[in-house]
Amino acid sequence: MAVNGMGQNLVPNPSFEDSVSCPSSSGDIAKAIGWSTLCASPDYFYTCSASNSFGVPNNIFGYQMPASGNAYAGFATYSNSAPNSREFPACNLSTSLSIGVKYYVSFKVALSIEPTFSQTNCASNKIGAMFTTNPYICNTLITNSPPVYTDSIITDSLNWTRIKGSFIADSNYTYLVIGNFFDDANTDTVSFANDFTYNSYYYLDDVCVGTDSVFVYNYSYTTGINKNYFNSQFSFYPNPANNFINVQSNLHVPYNIEIRNTLGQQLYEEQNITSNSLQLNISNYSSGLLFITITSDNNQFTYKLLKH
């Protein structure tokens, strides 16, 4: 089902396609732009990785093709060797939620089964989404009361399973967290091996939050935005650049532009731009990679610029 133009996704980099650099070690999810390692060490997997452990589709946790695009994340939901052991991928939403508004949430997971090395050998339920107004402290996330979660034990390691739900915002939430927010006593599991240690681990892709249920519940990276056409409407030069970057647009609707550094710090923002030619002064920015994000209507992409 095509859903182009029907809604807006408040999750930046929802399919983990935009990266600072390719993953190379455990806990590298912060290399996916907009995502953070805030509890334990959620992982990042990409076709560009030079490491066999964090590539796509083969990696340390098994074999899995992306739900869409070329990348995905991974996180642990249960371990019998450490009480309430969890990993929580998290991101800062592009816009704060509005109190009293109903929001829809969906994301896709696939079970990892790789008992011989990583001992990911069981499945769990209670995987869901939490929203907060503050950065997270790991031990405060086990609340047994996330607004969206599934009671089903997800055992499918071949196909992606979509988890979805809705809630009415009671605060201006700015952060989204994915994981198992229930303690061990309220988590059910199914094991697939006769081992002393049981761990459940899931791949994560196509995360979406918005107010349009049709858009959110059918979201995927390849259908949620008309990425190729939208990208082709912009050009940037020079690259690398020293003092100025020129932005040319063939898009005949207003757009927003934002520049961030590799730490995720916002350096520049301008909204509702109607000019087809824009020159930005970057002379005061530190040398290194800059990320220029263009947004218009339901479309968004990020361009990488090297600042000398």
Image (spheres, rainbow, N blue to C red):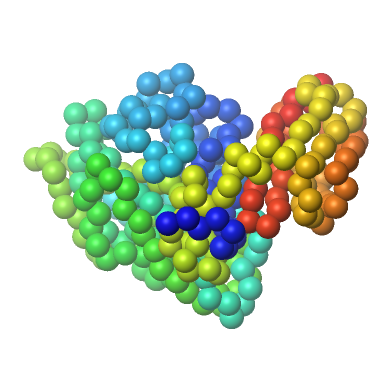
Quarter occupied by residue 196: top left
Residue at horizontal 88%, vertical 48%? 275
Q: Quadrant of the C terminus?
A: top right
Residue at horizontal 19%, vertical 34%? 115
Q: Nearer the viewer, residue 16 or 261?
A: 16
Residue at horizontal 71%, vertical 43%? 293
Q: Nearer the viewer, residue 276 or 239?
A: 276
The extreme top residue here reads 50
Name above or below for residue 110 compared with residue 281.
below
Residue 74 percent across, percent down from the top left: 39, 42
Whether residue 7 is visible here, answered yes or no, is yes
Residue 85 percent across, percent down from the top left: 34, 50
Name above or below for residue 290 compared with residue 78.
above
Relative placement, left or right, of 238 versus 154 is right
Name above or below for residue 185 compared with residue 280.
below
Quarter occupied by residue 145: bottom left
What is the number of callouts on the image? 0
Q: Quadrant of the N terminus?
A: bottom left
